[in-house]
C-alpha cells in the first residue's frame, strides 16, 4: 500500500485508482479512506481517485497536527504525485481540511463537495448547529474509559434508527470490524480542533463550484444552519437526502453518488 512521509516526518497512507482528472477524498472523525469504497467504484472510471487516511486513522501514522499542517502535508503528497489541479470531496471534519486547502491554494482546486460538513462544528450564540461544547468535552473524557465501546456508541449516533436497520449499515459494521481502531489520542485531539475551529469567514470568499450534501435527519448539520451557510456562500449548491443522518454516503450511497456525479459533471 502506498505511503508518503511528509517533511515533518508523518507517515500518510493513501490509495490512488484510475487516471485523468484528480479527485481527493478526505474522510472524517473515526473513519478511514476505505469508507469511500462506493464512491471509488463510481468515480475511478472517469477520474484519478485519491483517498487518504488522516493522522491516527486507518494505516497512517500519528502526530498531533493543526488543520493547516494537515493541509500542507496533503499538498506535499499531491505535489509528489505530480498533481497540480484537483477537486475535493470531504466528509464531516474532513470538510474543515478541504476549506483550509482551498485557503492555501484556491487556484489549484476545481470543485469542492462536502457531505455532513459545516464551517463550524461547535454550537454557540446565534449558531444553532453542530455539537454542544460540553458534550464534545464529555465525549473526549469518556474516551479515557472503555474506548472501543464509547467509540461504537458515538459512531452509531451518526445514523438514524432506520439506517441502522439497513443492509448497508451491516456492511458498515463489517468494515469497522476489519479496520484498526483510530488512535485514542487522535480522536481527543480532533475533538479539541472541532470545538475551537471556526471557518465561517472562509466560505463567503470561495468562488469555485461548491456543493453541500446533507441528510435531513443530521442533528449535527440541521436545516437552519444549512440555510445560514446558503446565505453566506457564492456559487454553492445544496442537496438534501431525505431521512438520512450524518453519513449518507455510506448508507444512502446510490442517492449520494447520483448527487455527487451530477455536481461533478454539471
Image: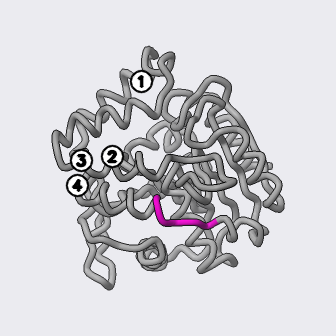
In the displayed structure, 194 sits above or below 221; it is: below
Residue ID for mark 1: 169
Mark pair 4, 1: CA separation: 23 Å
Label 3 element class:
loop
Q: CA distance from mark 2 to mark 1?
A: 23 Å
Which stretch is magenta?
195-199
Distance Cα–Cα, label 3 vs label 4: 10 Å
| Secondary structure found at label 4 | loop
In the picture of the structure, the residue carrying the numbered disc 4 is 183
Would you say 139 lies left or right of 164 here?
Answer: left
Give the quarter of the image for residue 4.
bottom left
Q: Residues within 10 Å of mark 4 (few under 14, many from 20)?
A: some
Q: Cβ–Cβ below 8 Å for labels 4 and 1?
A: no
Residues under numbered marks 4 and 2 in contact, where contact means CB atoms less than 8 Å apart: no
Image-based side of 95 in relation to 170, left or right: right
Quadrant including the N terminus: bottom left
Return the residue at label 3.
143
Q: In this rendering, is residue 122 above or below 2? A: above
> Which sits earlier in the primary sequence, circle 3 or circle 4?
3
How many residues crowd mark 1 within 10 Å: few (<14), some (14–19), many (20+)? some
User: What is the quadrant of residue 34 in the picture?
Assistant: top left
* Relative side of 155 to 247, left or right: left
Tell me if label 2 and label 3 are in contact, CB under 8 Å.
Answer: yes
| Position of residue 153 measured from the top left corner of the image (x, y, whole percent) | 32, 32
User: Where residue 85 sits in the image (x, y, percent)?
Assistant: 62, 72
Name the spot of residue 252 as percent of width and height, x first. 56, 28
Task: Answer with mark 4 or mark 2, whichever residue precedes in sequence.
Answer: 2
Q: Which residue is identified by label 2? A: 139
Amino acid at each position: 500500500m502506498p505511503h508518503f512521509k511528509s517533511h515533518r516526518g508523518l507517515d500518510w497512507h493513501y490509495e490512488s485508482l484510475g487516471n485523468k482528472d484528480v479527485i481527493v477524498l478526505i474522510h472524517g472523525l473515526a473513519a478511514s479512506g476505505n469508507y469511500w469504497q462506493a464512491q471509488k467504484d463510481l468515480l475511478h472510471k472517469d477520474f484519478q481517485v485519491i483517498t487518504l487516511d488522516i493522522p491516527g486513522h486507518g494505516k497512517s501514522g500519528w502526530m498531533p497536527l493543526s488543520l493547516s499542517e494537515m493541509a500542507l502535508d496533503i499538498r506535499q503528497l499531491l505535489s509528489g504525485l505530480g498533481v497540480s489541479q484537483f477537486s475535493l470531496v470531504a466528509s464531516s471534519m474532513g470538510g474543515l481540511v478541504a476549506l483550509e486547502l482551498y485557503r492555501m491554494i484556491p487556484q489549484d482546486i476545481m470543485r469542492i463537495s462536502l457531505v455532513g460538513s459545516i464551517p463550524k462544528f461547535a454550537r454557540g450564540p446565534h449558531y444553532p448547529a453542530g455539537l454542544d461544547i460540553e458534550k464534545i468535552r464529555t465525549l473526549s473524557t469518556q474516551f479515557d474509559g472503555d474506548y472501543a465501546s464509547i467509540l461504537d456508541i458515538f459512531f452509531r449516533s451518526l445514523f438514524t434508527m432506520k439506517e441502522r436497520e439497513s443492509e448497508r449499515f451491516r456492511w458498515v459494521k463489517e468494515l469497522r470490524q476489519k479496520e484498526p481502531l483510530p488512535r485514542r489520542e487522535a480522536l481527543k485531539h480532533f475533538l479539541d480542533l472541532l470545538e475551537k475551529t471556526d471557518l465561517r469567514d472562509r466560505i463567503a470568499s470561495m468562488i469555485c463550484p461548491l456543493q453541500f450534501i446533507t441528510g435531513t435527519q443530521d442533528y449535527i448539520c440541521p436545516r437552519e444552519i444549512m440555510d445560514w451557510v446558503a446565505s453566506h456562500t457564492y456559487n454553492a449548491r445544496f442537496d438534501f437526502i431525505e431521512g438520512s443522518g450524518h453519513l449518507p454516503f455510506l448508507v444512502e450511497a446510490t442517492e449520494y453518488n447520483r448527487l455527487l456525479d451530477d455536481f461533478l459533471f454539471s
